Image: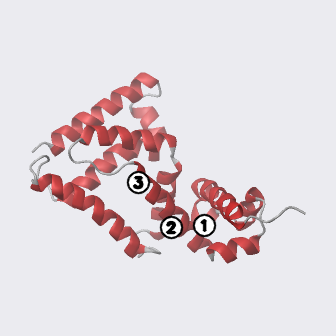
């Protein structure tokens, strides 16, 4: 009989949950499918992560932490930050899908682990505000609004790829042109 490896099991459950929630959302996800994909039993999922909502919150929290570490806000190089953000979401579209599903499920209601999320965004807003205070980006728009605008511009094409294809086109040259347009728009909005 093979030795049990709880950390490996937790990692398999986590990855299976990411895929399940990204594809089906909170309401449509099934713990049975996660267990089957992770080659784990349902009781372990509940023991490690709690209920389905807690599992979703943990998945999203960890994916957002990965983004924050991988692509920190950089007010000194907004165009470079946009490139890194676009590349990250191109390689990891599941994060935006998870955020979209969360919005569909919770709307404007309070989120599980909302205090942690607020702290996450407060750090990003602080980086933008620092750039404003140093005069490298405009202070004509409040820092939280500025960050929201930039994130929306950079992320929307991944959230609604069908709209991107219809409006912008589906070829690589179209994606390159859109990237350049997003960066130009960001330059216009962020210029001090």
Q: Is residue 183 above or below residue 18?
A: above
Image position, residue 151 (x, y; %): 32, 50
Q: Residue shown at 45%/58% (left/top)?
A: 64
Q: Is residue 154 above or below residue 54?
A: above
Q: Residues within 10 Å of mark 2 (few under 14, many from 20)?
A: some
| In the image: residue 133, left or right of residue 98 | left
Q: Residue furthest top?
A: 173
Q: Is residue 43 above or below residue 145?
A: below
In the rendered structure, which disc, 3 or 1, sits on the residue that comes first in sequence?
A: 1
Kindly check if marks 2 and 3 are in contact, taking CB atoms under 8 A apart as contact.
no
Locate residue 49: give its quadrant. Answer: bottom right
Q: Residue shown at 23%/34% (left/top)?
A: 184
Q: Tag on residue 69?
A: 3
Q: Residues within 10 Å of mark 3 (few under 14, many from 20)?
A: few
Q: Residue shown at 13%/53% (left/top)?
A: 132
Q: Residues within 10 Å of mark 1 (few under 14, many from 20)?
A: few
Q: Viewer-proximal residue, 78 or 153?
A: 78
Image position, residue 3 (x, y; %): 82, 64
The residue indicated by pointer 1 is 27
Q: CA distance from mark 3 to mark 1?
A: 29 Å
Please state which of the two labelled residues, at mark 2 or mark 3, is closer to the viewer.
Answer: 3
The residue indicated by pointer 2 is 105
């Amino acid at each position: 009989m093979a030795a049990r490896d709880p950390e490996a099991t937790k990692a398999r459950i986590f990855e299976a949950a990411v895929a399940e929630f990204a594809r089906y959302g909170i309401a449509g996800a099934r713990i049975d499918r996660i267990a089957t994909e992770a080659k784990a039993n349902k009781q372990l999922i509940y023991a490690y992560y709690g209920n389905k909502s807690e599992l979703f919150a943990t998945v999203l929290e960890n994916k957002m932490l990965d983004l924050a570490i991988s692509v920190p806000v950089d007010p000194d190089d907004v165009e470079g930050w946009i490139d890194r953000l676009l590349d990250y979401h191109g390689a990891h579209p599941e994060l935006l899908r998870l955020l979209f599903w969360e919005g569909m499920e919770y709307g404007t209601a309070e989120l599980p682990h909302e205090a942690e999320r607020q702290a996450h965004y407060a750090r990003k807003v602080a980086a933008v505000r620092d750039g404003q205070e140093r005069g490298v980006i405009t202070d004509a728009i409040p820092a939280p609004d500025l960050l929201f605008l930039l994130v929306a511009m950079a992320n929307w094409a991944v959230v609604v790829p069908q709209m991107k294809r219809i409006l912008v086109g589906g070829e690589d040259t179209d994606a390159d042109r859109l990237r350049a347009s997003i960066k130009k728009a960001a330059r216009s909005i962020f210029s001090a």
